[in-house]
Amino acid sequence: MLGFMSTLTALVLAVFVGYGGAWYFGLVEGNFSLLLFLATVVTGVYWLAEKFYFWPQRRRAAERIEHEAAARRGELASKGITQVDGNLHDAQTKILMQPWWLDWTAGLFPVIVVVFLLRSFLFEPFKIPSGSMIPTLLVGDLILVNKFHYGVRLPVINLKLIDNNSPQRGDVMVFRYPPKPSLDYIKRVVGVPGDEVAYLNKKLTVNGMAVPKVAQPDFFDEDALRYAKEFKETTGNKTYRLLNDEDRAPFISSRYEFPFKQNCRYSIEGVVCKVPEGHYFMMGDNRDNSEDSRYWGFVPEANIVGKAFFVWMNFGNLKRIGAVD
C-alpha cells in the first residue's frame, strides 16, 4: 500500500510540474485558477486520508511497539534482567513521521487552501504587463484586486453567487478578455449598461455630455523615452490621469468581429457605441496606445474579475506603492 501511494504521488507531482513547465515555456495555455483549484482538491484528499487513515495507522503501530516493549521489559524483569537495549523513543518517532509523499501533499494543504480562498474570494495579485494604463499603472506594477467588490463568484467558472456593487464609471477593473477569456485584462470603465459612449477626435462623451478634461504638464515616458500630452479627466466623483499621443490619428480600426458590434458606428473621427445591458465599455488611460472596447467590443458582466485598488510593489520604483486612482 505504502509503495503504491509513493509511486502514485510521484506521478501526480510529475503531472503538476510538467504542466507548470509546459505553461512556462509557452507549450500550453495555462490557467492558474484551475491549477490552484486542482492542487487544493488533491492535497485536500491526501490531508483527509492522512487525518483519518494513515495517521491513526501510524499511531496504533507506535502504541503497539510500546506495549510490546513494556511486555518484554516485564518478562525480562521477572528473570532478574533490568538493563534492556534499544531506544523506544527513536523507534516511535520514525514510525510516526510522515513519509515524503504525505509531507509534500497533506503537509502543504493548509497553506494551499488559505491561498486558494484568499485569491478566489478576497484579493488576487496581478502584474501589469503593458503600458495601456499609463500613467495610472506602469509596467511592472504589482497590484491587488478586490475580488468581492463586484460580488462573490465561484473560482474557475466565475459564476456569481452573491451580488455586491455594480461597476461604476471611472473604476479600474480587471476582467477576462472577451476574445480570449483565458487572459486577464485591466482597463477603466467609461461606459455602463445603457450608456452611449462617444470617443471622437480624442474627446470622450457619455450620453451626450463631454467628460471634463483638463490639461496637465507633459508626461515623460521613461520606457519609450518620449513625452506625451497628459490630462486629468473627471467621471462622476473620480478624477484620474490619461495620456494622448498627438502623432496618432483619431481613426479606430474595427477589424474585430464581436457581439453587439451593430451598436457601434465607426468613422474617421473615432467611434460611438451604445452599451448593451449586462455589458461595459472599457478604455485604457494611455488612450492612443490601448487596444480596448473601441476595438474588440464590450465586456460582459460574467467576465468581471474584480476592482484594482492598490499597488503593493514595483521593484524598480518603490514610490509607486499606494492606492489606485
Image (cartoon, rainbow, N blue to C red):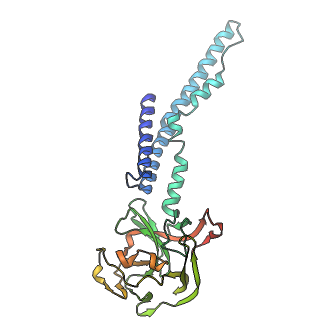
> Can you give x and y, in whole percent of width and height, for residue 206 in the image?
42, 89
> Can you give x and y, in whole percent of width and height, for residue 103 in the image?
54, 38
Nearer-the-camera pick, 36 or 69: 36
Nearer-the-camera pick, 204 or 40: 204
- Please determine whether, in this image, residue 262 is positioned above or below residue 61: below
Quarter placement of the C terminus? bottom right
Nearer-the-camera pick, 60 or 214: 214
Report if residue 278 is visible in the image: no
- Residue at the location (60% across, 73% down)? 323
- Residue at the location (29% across, 79% down)? 261
Quarter placement of the N terminus? top left
> Can you give x and y, in whole percent of width and height, for residue 221 in the image?
56, 74
* The residue positioned farthest toward the top in the image shown: 79
Nearer-the-camera pick, 277 or 24: 24
Report if residue 210 is visible in the image: yes
- Please determine whether, in this image, residue 181 is positioned above or below residue 226: above
* Side of 316 where 288 appears, left or right: left
Count of numbered circles in the view: 0
- Please determine whether, in this image, residue 263 is positioned above or below residue 113: below
> Can you give x and y, in whole percent of width and height, for residue 137 in the image?
54, 72
The answer to which image quadrant residue 8 occupies is top left
